[in-house]
Amino acid sequence: RETPGIGMESRMLTTAMLTAINDLRRAKRSCFFLATNRLRAFDSAITRPGRFDMQLFVGTPNLSSRVIQLRQKMASLALDDEVKHRTEVSYKEFLEKVWTEDAMFMNYLEGMQFATACANVVAHGGELTDDIMAPILKQQASVMTVRGP
């Protein structure tokens, strides 16, 4: 309803969802999860107060979580602990430099793709530097999920 161009298909989906939600609530033996990254696209009848017992916002990973993603990617690699440590430090310092430009806007999967690409550089004997990571991030940013206002 918030979007003037809402089509019949969307209105029918709203009606079907409301019916399904009401049936589940009556059963009192079920748990209903709804996940979206476009909450504003839902009809207000779906998201009105009282419709769900709880709404939980899950944001994008923070800087520490992104370093953990890299650590997880490197865990299975046969690398010296010193190399892993240097790589983590370089990775974190790079992300801190570009955090407000691109890095903080990557969702979980995009962050994992970036961490994987960086871990692959190290796995093939490369040193993880800003000059190596910048083009990887630039390529990643060019295909990142488009975010609305």
Image: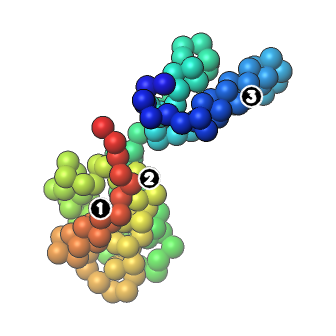
* Badge 2 vs badge 3, beta-carbon distance below 8 Å: no
The first of marks 3 and 1 along the sequence is 3
Q: Amino acid at mark 2?
A: Tyr
State the SS at label 2. helix
The first of marks 2 and 3 along the sequence is 3
Q: Nearer the viewer, residue 43 or 125?
A: 43
Residue in view at x 24 percent, y 54 percent: 102
Relative placement, left or right, of 79 versus 98 is right
Counting from the top left corner in percent of width and height, residue 122 is at: 34, 79
Relative placement, left or right, of 146 versus 99 is right
Quarter of the rendering containing residue 86: bottom left
Residue in view at x 34 percent, y 42 percent: 148
- Dot in front, 2 or 1: 1
- Dot in front, 2 or 3: 3
Residue at mark 1: 141
Q: CA distance from mark 2 to mark 3?
A: 30 Å
Q: Amino acid at mark 3?
A: Ala
Q: Which mark is residue 108?
A: 2
Counting from the top left corner in percent of width and height, residue 115 is at: 38, 65
Quarter of the rendering containing residue 28: top right
